[in-house]
Image (tube, rainbow, N blue to C red):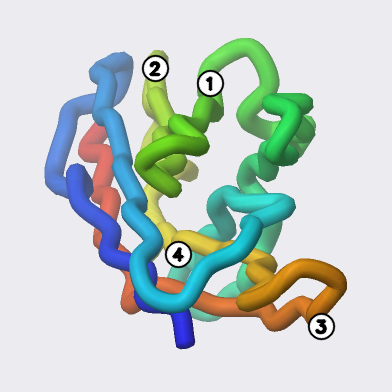
Amino acid sequence: QVQLVESGGGLVQAGGSLRLSCAASGSIFSINPMGWYRQAPGKQRELVALITSGSSPNYADSVKGRFTISRDNAKNTVYLQMNSLKPEDTAVYYCYAVASHREYGPEFAYWGQGTQVTVSS
């Protein structure tokens, strides 16, 4: 099992910044990819950004140029730096990781409990 613990959410004014962190722990051989999804009230969960173990990022069009994803493989931690925040970025942000527990073993998807990000206008 893998546990994902998020931190860094909160309330910020439009144009402001927040940094989310997600640390993975448990029985981990490798994690690839790792990243963030979000879900706003009344909407489906959507991809925000993912990053591979080789640090290759993938962003939703809506956040390109404003958000930056990074990871520390030694700490099994992923970060999301969010700049120029907009009210439409308001959502619960979920950490996501695909992990294997042994070499050549199967991969499993894991989710964090979510952290609220609220951007006021």
The residue lying at 62 percent from left, 71 percent from top is: 45
**Pointer 1: residues within 10 angstroms few (<14), some, or many (20+)?**
some
**Amino acid type indicated by mark 1:** Thr
- Mark 2 highlights which residue? 83
Q: Earlier in the sequence, mark 2 or mark 1?
A: 1
Q: Secondary structure at mark 4?
A: strand
Nearer the observer, disc 2 or disc 4? 4
Where 109 falls versus 49 (above or below)?
below
Q: Is residue 95 visible?
A: yes
The answer to which of 88 and 50 lies nearer the viewer is 50
Q: Earlier in the sequence, mark 4 or mark 1?
A: 1
Res. 85 image quadrant: top left
Q: Position of residue 106 (x, y in %)?
A: 81, 83
The answer to which of 45 and 14 lies nearer the viewer is 45
What's the mark number on residue 94? 4
What's the mark number on residue 68? 1
**Amino acid type indicated by mark 2:** Asn
- Residue 23 horizontal side relative to residue 34, left or right: left
Q: Earlier in the sequence, mark 1 or mark 3?
A: 1
Q: Earlier in the sequence, mark 2 or mark 4?
A: 2
- Residue 14 horizontal side relative to residue 35, left or right: left
